[in-house]
Image: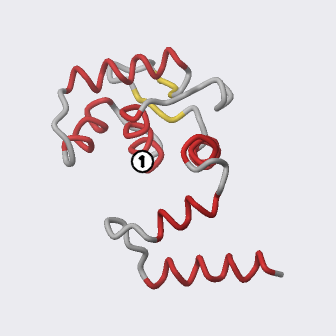
C-alpha cells in the first residue's frame, strides 16, 4: 500500500475516495451516479480520473470481470490526518487552535449540539 506522503489526492480524487470509503467497493458507474447528485460531471471524466487514481495507487481495481470494481487503496483516517496536518501547517501557521476557531466560527458549517458535546468531551479529556 502506498504511503500517504507519496500520494497527494486532488480535490476531484478526494470526492471519488469519499464515495469509495462510504461504499467499500464500487464500479465507475456507481461512483459517477453518486457524484452526479451534487455536481455536473461527465461519465468519461469519472472513468479517466479513476484510471489515473489506479495508476497512482490511490485505488485498487479488480478487473477479473467485465465490469471493473474499484476500492480505496489508502486509509480514510490516515488520509484525513495527513491532509489536516498539512492544512494546519500551510494555512494556519501550525496552529490547530486557529483551525478550530475558524471551523467552529463558520456559519456555513455550524456544529450541532451533539457535535459540540463531542468536542467538549474531547476538550475535557485533553485538560486532564
Count up the numbered dots: 1
Q: Quadrant of the N terminus?
A: top right
Q: How crowded is mark 1: few (under 14 residues within 10 Å), some or many (20 or more)?
A: few
Q: In which quarter of the image is residue 97?
A: bottom right
Residue 45 coordinates in the image, percent (x, y):
25, 22
Residue at (50%, 77%) from the top-left corner? 115
- Vertical placement of 27 versus 18: above or below? above
Q: Quadrant of residue 63?
A: top left
Depth check: 111 or 101 in front?
101
Identity of the residue drawn at 64% across and 46% down: 85
Residue 1 appears in the picture as rendered: no
Quadrant, the C terminus = bottom right
Q: Looking at the image, which residue sits at the far front?
A: 93
In the image, residue 112 above or below residue 59? below
Q: Can residue 89 be seen in this view?
A: yes
Q: Which residue lies furthest to the right in this view?
A: 128
**87 over 42 or under it: above or below:** below
Which residue is tagged 1? 23
Residue 90 locus on image (x, y percent): 58, 40
Amino acid at each position: 500500500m502506498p504511503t500517504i506522503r507519496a500520494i497527494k489526492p486532488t480535490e476531484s480524487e478526494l470526492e471519488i475516495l469519499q464515495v469509495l470509503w462510504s461504499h467499500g467497493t464500487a464500479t465507475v458507474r456507481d461512483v459517477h451516479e453518486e457524484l452526479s447528485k451534487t455536481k455536473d460531471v461527465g461519465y468519461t471524466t469519472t472513468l479517466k480520473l479513476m484510471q489515473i487514481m489506479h495508476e497512482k495507487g490511490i485505488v485498487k481495481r479488480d478487473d477479473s470481470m467485465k465490469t471493473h470494481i474499484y476500492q480505496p487503496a489508502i486509509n480514510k483516517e490516515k488520509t484525513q490526518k495527513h491532509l489536516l496536518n498539512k492544512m494546519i501547517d500551510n494555512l494556519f501557521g501550525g496552529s490547530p487552535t486557529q483551525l478550530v476557531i475558524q471551523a467552529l466560527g463558520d456559519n456555513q458549517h455550524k456544529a450541532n449540539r451533539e457535535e459540540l458535546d463531542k468536542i467538549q468531551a474531547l476538550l475535557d479529556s485533553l485538560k486532564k
